[in-house]
Image (tube, rainbow, N blue to C red):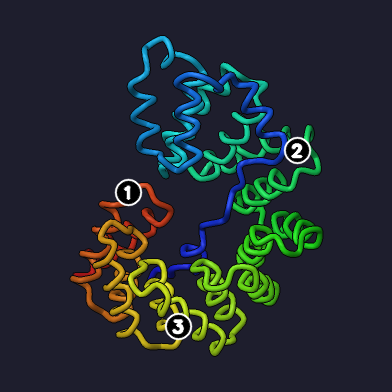
């Protein structure tokens, strides 16, 4: 039995908002305005993450020992894509500033992105108790619910948000993701189409629509979506993986191998790319190539969600030689 790459592997980019109107007041209450911290905040707001991290590391020792410094370093790590590191800094800030809603929110976001959504939910529940109508917090909660495997609850929460705010892209896109994860392909197709109306040509919407249409067995829709994605983003590894999945679903395994192979060329450190390539190679009976791809996947993501299944497949393949 070969491994199966689920479409949701390509669709993990659910948007986590930073919080609603309460956030500016809460951030001001952290004492970040003025001086060196204010400069770092300005850098982060402009997306200058590397500069912000460098500035934080160069601050005097007395400032680096404050919870405010830990909070800003946590945000810097989060924006840099290092969720695990962000959790450590933000947990330190939360321990020393337990009443700060801004810290709680960012810690919850970091926990979700680090694969610890169940730990994020109590933080978000507490924030929503204080701000029950805040749409961004409700979106964050829905994303955390989905990441924790509570897909039905996530879909219900996002459905309410989409009804209240029908032109909010984040709500429609995340509802599509939740419906797809919940096995509701018809709703997923509809919501991704609504998201496409709001943000035409978006890469993740096109991938989501392709996956949802495949699940709904509308192969014309699926191929149209993935072809548009390829035409817009020909060198994007996620799009190439989506194309590989679509080709596999059509029974075109050699074309699928080519697509996944190209994804590993343009993104040699993409663990999912090597996973998908190995899976197709295994289906084609190319054991040596399969082993190389699976081993490369494990080198990149030894603790990833597919690491243990890949190790099991490698053992089976190698013992069968």
Residue 180 in sight in this render? yes
Residue 119 showing in the rendered view: no
Residue at position x 67%, y 21% in the image: 99
Could you tell me how far apart the alpha carbons at marks 1 and 2 are, in whole angstroms? 36 Å
How far across and down, in percent of the image, does residue 100 sit?
A: 65, 24
Q: Which residue is mark 3?
A: 227
Q: Residue at x 70, y 43 (%)?
A: 137
Q: Mark 2 highlights which residue?
A: 128
Q: Specify which label sits upstream in the sequence, 1 or 3.
A: 3
Question: Element under label 2?
Answer: helix
First in sequence, mark 1 or 2: give its number: 2
Q: Nearer the viewer, mark 3 or mark 2?
A: 3
257 horizontally vs 36: left or right:
left
Q: Is residue 262 left or right of residue 89?
A: left
Q: Position of residue 207 (x, y in %)?
A: 50, 71
Residue ranking furthest to the top: 62
Q: The residue tagged with tag 1: helix, strand or loop?
A: loop
Q: Residues within 10 Å of mark 2 (few under 14, many from 20)?
A: some
CA distance for labels 3 and 2: 41 Å
């Amino acid at each position: 039995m070969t491994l199966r790459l689920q479409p949701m592997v390509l669709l993990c980019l659910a948007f986590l908002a930073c919080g609603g109107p309460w956030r500016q007041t809460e951030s001001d209450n952290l004492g970040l305005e003025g001086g060196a911290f204010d400069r770092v905040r300005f850098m982060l707001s402009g997306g200058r993450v590397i500069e912000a991290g460098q500035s934080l590391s160069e601050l005097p020792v007395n400032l680096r020992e404050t919870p405010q410094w830990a909070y800003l370093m946590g945000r810097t790590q989060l924006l840099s894509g290092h969720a695990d590191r962000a959790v450590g800094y933000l947990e330190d800030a939360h321990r020393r500033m337990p009443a700060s809603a801004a810290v709680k929110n960012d810690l919850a976001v970091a926990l979700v992105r680090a694969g610890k959504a169940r730990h994020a939910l109590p933080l978000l529940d507490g924030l929503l108790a204080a701000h029950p109508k805040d749409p961004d917090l409700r979106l964050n909660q829905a994303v955390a619910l989905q990441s924790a495997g509570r897909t039905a609850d996530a879909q219900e929460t996002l459905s309410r948000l989409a009804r209240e705010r029908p032109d909010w892209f984040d709500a429609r896109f995340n509802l599509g993701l939740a419906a797809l994860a919940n096995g509701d392909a018809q709703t997923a197709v509809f919501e991704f189409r609504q998201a496409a109306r709001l943000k035409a040509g978006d890469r993740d919407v096109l991938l989501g629509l392709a996956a949802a249409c495949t699940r709904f067995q509308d192969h014309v829709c699926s191929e149209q979506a993935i072809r548009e994605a390829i035409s817009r983003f020909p060198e994007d590894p996620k799009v190439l993986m989506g194309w590989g999945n679509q080709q596999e679903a059509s029974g075109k395994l050699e074309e699928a191998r080519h697509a996944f192979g190209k994804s590993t060329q343009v993104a040699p450190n993409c663990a999912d790319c090597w996973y998908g390539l190995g899976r197709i190679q295994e289906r084609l009976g190319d054991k040596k190539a399969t082993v190389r791809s699976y081993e490369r996947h494990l080198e990149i993501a030894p603790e990833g969600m597919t690491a243990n299944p890949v190790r099991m497949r490698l053992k089976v393949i190698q013992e069968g030689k």
